[in-house]
Amino acid sequence: MPVKIRLQRHGKKGKPYYWIVAADARSKRDGRYLEKIGSYNPNTNPATIELDVDGAVTWLQNGAQPTDTAKAILSYKGALLKNHLAGGVRKGALTEEQAEAKFNAWLEEKASKVQAKADGLAKADADAKAKALEAEKAVNEARIAAAAPVVEEAAEEADAEVEATANNEEE
């Protein structure tokens, strides 16, 4: 039975949410699956991925073939690297401790990159809000300035009318 690691779509129209599953290649896209390995939410920035790396590695070692998108997700989370390192351990090129140390170092580096992107997005969002607030303040000040002379002119016209009325009464 050929097994694929693929995405199973959930969520509503326009808001996809995917499960990462190991399924028989002959089953429907959203049909029966053998095991749920994780989930993928592309609606967030950066995308939220929860993956059981050890479960994915087990399926890969048993011959499961990931689809293109699933392969990108597995690579992003390090499942393909862990599978590669496990192959090196089986062949005797690495010890289990060396492979685990390499994988943990890679995970730390990846986490720092993801955190840097999240910080950059938060900073850009804060800058955009500050810029919008400054623009709104400028518009409000311009509106107040435009409204102030109109009041003064009306007051001057009223003073002129009062003087004209006073002059008319004197005559």
Image: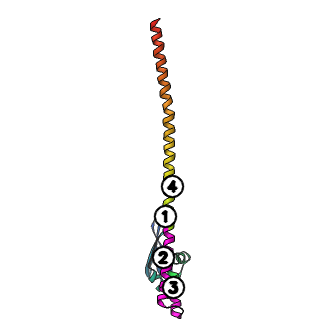
Give how far across and how far down residue 166 sits, in percent.
45, 11
Q: At x 47% / y 14%, what residue is drawn? A: 163
Q: Could you give the CA–CA distance between mark 3 and mark 1, rounded to whole angstroms?
A: 31 Å
Q: Could you give the CA–CA distance between mark 1 and mark 2, rounded to whole angstroms?
A: 16 Å
Q: Could you give the CA–CA distance between mark 3 and mark 4, rounded to whole angstroms?
A: 42 Å
Whether 83 is drawn above or below 9: the answer is below
Where does the magenta region start and end? 86-115
Check disc 4: other Cα within 10 Å, few if <14, some if 14-19, many if 20+. few
Check disc 3: other Cα within 10 Å, few if <14, some if 14-19, many if 20+. some
Give how far across and how far down residue 132 sits, in percent.
50, 49
Q: At x 50% / y 37%, what residue is drawn? A: 143
Residue type, label 2 = Glu
Residue type, label 1 = Asp
Residue position for label 2? 108
Q: Secondary structure at mark 2?
A: helix
Q: Earlier in the sequence, mark 1 or mark 2?
A: 2
Residue type, label 3 = Asn
Question: Residue 83 bears which disc, if any?
Answer: 3
Question: Residue 119 bears which disc, if any?
Answer: 1
Residue type, label 4 = Asp
Q: Is residue 96 in the magenta section?
A: yes
Q: Is residue 154 in the magenta section?
A: no
**Hey, which quadrant is residue 72 in on the image?**
bottom right
Q: Earlier in the sequence, mark 1 or mark 4?
A: 1
Furthest-bottom residue in this view: 92
Residue position for label 4? 127
